[in-house]
Image (cartoon, grey):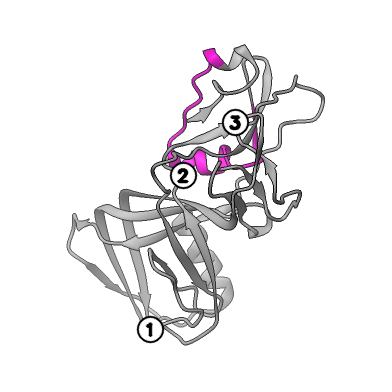
Amino acid sequence: ELKTSLTQHREGLALDLNRDLSSAIYEYAPGSQIVAGGLVWTSAGVYTLPSKDLVGGSMAECTECGFFERSLKPLEAVCPQCAGNRKVHGYVVPEFGFIADRQATRPGRKPPMRGRNGTTHHLGGGEPTTEVITSRTTLGGTWERVACERARMVAVSTGANGGGFVLCDWCGRGWSASLGGFGKPHRHAWKDEPCTGPTHLRWLAHEFETDVLTIKPSDITMPEEAMWSTLYALLE
């Protein structure tokens, strides 16, 4: 939910703005805007509860081989698959929703600020619904295909230019790290008072289950043009 009931506008009491969390981490990310009830609402950050911390951890993606890893514990900057360098980022799961800024505005000529920066990663798992199907190609390699139910995926909102979001641990106020404008102290996310809580750089993430078809090419040598052709054939 993007909570609008704690703002200065009575229109917010009548709104019920909800998204699946895999979409909300993009549409309701700090700084994003949405038009509802005749007003433009800007997300001030993530909603927090005084007695419960948000679940979080570390994510890393290798710049050499693309291997992705997620853990509740800190990760090393060296890829365990190819020993290449990888970027490690902290993340949180905004399970309690988001909070709208206390001040809403009237729609103008400029469109609302929206961004869908991020990606989705396959974490594995799931129950196979078919046996592994292996087929040999004229190039001498093989393709392996298997369909799974309830495979695990994670959607990651990385913010503008992948810079992430600066989030306050106390009130949840957030800023896009790439756009700047954040600091300490700052205005409390939903109270009309200053907040001196600590801030940290984070991505927003949500893990979910879905059906997945995994296709693995093995020992196949193709020119680059054939790889692109194969990719678009799969997408179609």
Identify residue for label 2.
94
Point out residue 14 in the picture as x, y percentages from the top left corner: 53, 12
Question: Is-magenta flag for residue 16?
Answer: yes
Q: Amino acid at mark 1?
A: Asp
Point out residue 171 in the picture as x, y percentages from the top left corner: 56, 41
Identify residue for label 1.
219
Point out residue 186 in the picture as x, y percentages from the top left corner: 69, 43
Q: Residue at x 20, y 58 (%)?
A: 128
Mark carried by residue 190: 3
Disc 1, SS: loop
Looking at the image, residue 80 lies above or below residue 213: below
Residue at the far right in the pictured view? 109
For residue 201, which quarter of the picture? Answer: bottom right
Q: Which residues are magenta?
A: 13-34
Point out residue 144 in the picture as x, y percentages from the top left corner: 29, 70
Residue at the far bottom in the pictured view? 83
Report the Cα–Cα distance between label 2 and label 1.
42 Å
Disc 2, SS: loop
The local crowd at label 2, few if under 14, some if 14 to 19, many if 20 or more residues have their Cα within 10 Å, is: many
Q: Nearer the viewer, residue 79 or 170?
A: 170
Q: Amino acid at mark 3?
A: Trp
Q: Earlier in the sequence, mark 3 or mark 1?
A: 3
Q: Nearer the viewer, residue 7 or 188?
A: 188
For residue 38, which quarter of the picture? Answer: top right
Left/right of residue 38 with respect to residue 216 in the rendered view = right
Q: Amino acid at mark 2?
A: Pro
Looking at the image, residue 128 lies above or below residue 94: below
